Image (cartoon, rainbow, N blue to C red):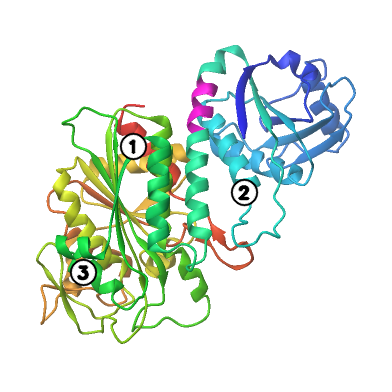
Amino acid sequence: MNVQATVVGTADLASVESDVLVLVLGAAHKVNARGTAAEQLFHAAIKSGDLEAKGGQSLYLHGAQGFSARRVLLVVARDGSVKAFRQAIDGALGALKSRRLKTMAVAALGIELTDGHAEMLCLSLEHTFYVYRHTKPSAEALRAPVKVALCVPSEQLTAAKAGVRRGHAVAAGVGVARECANRPGNACTPTWLGDEARRIGREHGLSVKVLDRKEIEKIGMGSFLSVSRGSDEPPRFIIMEYRGGAAKAAPVVLVGKGITFDTGGISLKPAPEMDEMKFDMGGAASVLGTMRAIGELKPKLNVVALIPTCENMPSGRATKPGDVVTSLSGQTIEILNTDAEGRLILCDALTYAARYKPAAIVDVATLTGACVIALGHHHAGLFASDDELAAQLLAAAGSAQDPAWRMPLDDEYAEGLKSRFADVANVGGRPGGSITAAKFLHRFVGSTPWAHLDIAGVAYKGGAAKGSTGRPVGLLTHFLLSRAGR
């Protein structure tokens, strides 16, 4: 989808030629009956009672008098914030997506459009016009506009162009994450994920290695391999490297949980909604999408992505509750519940990350149902060993409109992970389950600044709207760009 920022003064909006002109009004902006044609149109609609100056209200006009655009859609945003603008654009595109539009123009009255506003336009377009069709060819593809013009005054053009560029990349990354996670477990296997990583690497100049079972065994990732033991699908360990910084500069390492299907193993999950466990590789999907975005934006820093990926299945070979395995770090783990498998593959990847002497490590995982209970489906759970790193991630969450909430990481929470038969148990009790899971991971990062994003509540939606959200590609991309000074 081609989105371009272009200079069009407010007084010239009536002359914009397009299949549809979307005009977004900040609710606090008082339109003038004797102002520009756009203001007069809003004033008349509000005065007649056809439109309320309240956030979320809209009015569709066909052949508006004095306007060159074939259609005009008037939309009111709650205020001038990036969040309110995104909500207004989402509503507008939702009203238009069934119409066959080749061109679209978007402009705002009473809102100073920044790079953030421009980025959200791109993300809203991706969100509205994405349709999963890989295993459902009967799904009708939505025809997104071929050209979208973001009309801004000249003084806002530089920021708008920067936002569009970033928005293109983040939206493409979100699209990668959604497409990977939406594929069923028999299509999105660990082998396929490795192939997808190679494809992204070829197209965007990233170095990619995909290790097979023998190579993983040679490294000594006993905890990771214990999860894959019950499946006929071979595991993969994906290593992606982006080198945009100085040769000796310490990289940021991203680690993504890649359980392509999670039955719970011997600790079998209940049947209802088990199909949604194809989304248990949402962390891996978001890391792949982030590397896709970074490969396009090319910031001046080094980034390494590590993705341990396998299935968690029950069989005669599967790991049993009570088994003890040895992790790459040398620590032994008593597996009390085989459905707490994500931390078992992540801990070996976190230990491996130390080989890069990283500046920071961020792991991303659909890790615990407990995080969903704690935070619902709006905020991701953020756990961090370092206050500065936590602040950077929270700032990125705000910039990307990809919310996260910092959770505690006190040492007392590790008490429940003690084991009589190993160095650590893989689960504690029910209380504070997302925190004890984070404390388990914390054991494997040493002194490196580390953060863990539990995205179990935000990586996908269930029910009638079932599907991947692509989160937190936006958060991760903004975080990496901020580390590069952008």
Image disc number at residue 130: 2
Within-10-Å neighbours for mark 1: few <14, some 14–19, many 20+: many
Q: Quadrant of the C terminus?
A: top left
Amino acid at circle 2: Tyr
CA distance separating discs 3 and 2: 37 Å
- Viewer-nearest of labels 1 and 3? 3
Task: Tell me which residue sits at (86%, 38%) in the image.
Answer: 49
257 in relation to 167, above or below? below
Residue at the far bottom in the pictured view? 316
Q: Quadrant of the N terminus?
A: top right
Q: Main secondary structure of the magenta part?
A: helix
Image disc number at residue 223: 3
Amino acid at circle 1: Leu
- x, y percent for residue 432: 30, 69
CA distance separating discs 1 and 3: 29 Å
Tags 1 and 3 in contact by the CB under 8 Å rule? no
Tags 1 and 2 in contact by the CB under 8 Å rule? no
Closer to the chain start, of discs 1 and 3, is: 3
Q: In terms of depth relative to the viewer, which is nearer, 127 or 147? A: 147
Circle 1 residue: 480
